[in-house]
Amino acid sequence: MEHDWPWAPNPDYTRLVEALQGHGDPNHVPFLELFADREVIASLLRETAIPEAIQLVDREALRRGLDQKIRFWHQLGYDAFWQGPNLELPGVLRLDSDDTASLPRDKRHWVDEKAGAITDWRGFERYPWPRAQDADLYPMEYVARHLPEGMAIIAAVGGILEPVMWLMGYETFALAIYDQPDLIDAMFSKIEEIYVPLARTLVQMDRVIALWMGDDMGFKTGTMISPTHLRKHVFPRQKMIASVAHEQGMPFLLHSCGNLEGVMNDLIDEVGIDAKHSFEDVIEPVESFMAHHGDRIACIGGVDMDLLGRGTEEQIRARTRALLETCAASGAYVLGSGNSIANYVPLENFLAMVDEGWRYNG
């Protein structure tokens, strides 16, 4: 359903690529989000949300969900959006609770932090490891065929640290780094065997202009594991995937939550990230991050999630204007939220951020 928003979408993904590579137009800042929850997408389109579980088993439902995403991002004026294949890591243990968001789903889920499907060698050997060729590429093929002219896909590729923590449970994983180092080596090697060849496939697909890895590695004051272990197990494998993108002339983007200041030089100089996403004001506002690192990589987003979730429309507008006035001149800034458009973000707050972006761009 078309809206009467005062915008005239004219997508041009080349502007986004230029900004992600650090030489964008300071007078035209592109927009980008990791994702928007399906409840947000459906509500803004005045349609019905299609549960993810149904989309995974029903091709017609999947197509309807993908059509919603395309209409949503296009009408709002985005040049590209994050889309990946379907590739499940079975057996990730999840806990759930009631969802109290303004646009709730049945349950809210999170990964069990104590113990996962693999806690020892026996679990490792019995685990039904997927292969890169098991990935269902249909979602990306469908999107590529139905995107409006000027729009493109930023391909989602799995992280390196996250899946190991999910499959083992964070507590089990943290102990096994010291107690079962051979098992940890095997876990990371398995993830490499899946995601590196998958990345090679993704960069060859139609309408793909970049790779975007989601790999949360930190919390409020530091990294989830020591920098030493990140340098041993995680960064070399992230670099492999970054190199896959770079070999095709594409930028490699990293989404990672938490305080990564202690390893940012590793991520920029060794891994080779072209842009960083996920910013939280209580850790470091994006303006401060750009002052330290903006001459080497681009920055995506930074409108804080707490502000988007609980602030007033005018507060969001003021913060967005301030970010644009401070960051846009670098030619290496892309407007967006600090993380994603979650179903607890009031729709008017999200639209206020987007509208300020349109106003800045004239």
Image (cartoon, grey):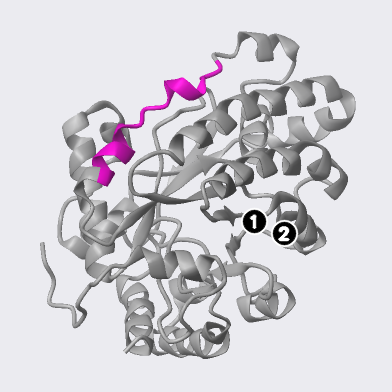
Q: Give the range drawn in magenta.
A: 129-144
When the figure is inspected, residue 285 is found, relative to residue 71, above or below; the finding is below
Counting from the top left corner in percent of width and height, residue 229 is at 83, 41
Q: How many labels does the image show?
A: 2
- In the rendered image, the quadrant that contains the N terminus is bottom left
Counting from the top left corner in percent of width and height, residue 334 is at 48, 72
Q: In which quarter of the image is residue 193?
A: top right
When the figure is inspected, residue 211 is found, relative to residue 14, above or below; the finding is above
Task: Name the residue: 20% across, 48% down.
Answer: 146
Residue 329 seen in render: yes
Mark 1–mark 2 distance (CA, rounded to whole Å): 5 Å
Of the image marks 1 and 2, the number of the one nearer the N terminus? 2
Residue 131 included in the magenta stretch of the image: yes
What secondary structure prevails in the magenta region? helix
According to the picture, the residue beneath numbered tag 1 turns out to be 273
Q: Quadrant of residue 344?
A: bottom left
Left or right of 94? Residue 184 is: right
Q: Which of 42 and 12 is in front in this view?
A: 12
Counting from the top left corner in percent of width and height, residue 179 is at 88, 25
Left or right of 215? Residue 119 is: right
When the figure is inspected, residue 152 is found, relative to residue 130, above or below; the finding is below
Task: Name the residue: 75% across, 48% down.
Answer: 224
- In the rendered image, the quadrant that contains the C terminus is bottom left
Local SS, label 2: helix
Q: What residue type is labelled 2?
A: Ile
Q: What residue type is labelled 1?
A: Ile
According to the picture, the residue beneath numbered tag 2 turns out to be 268
Circles 1, 2 touching at the beta carbon (< 8 Å): yes
Residue 50 seen in render: no
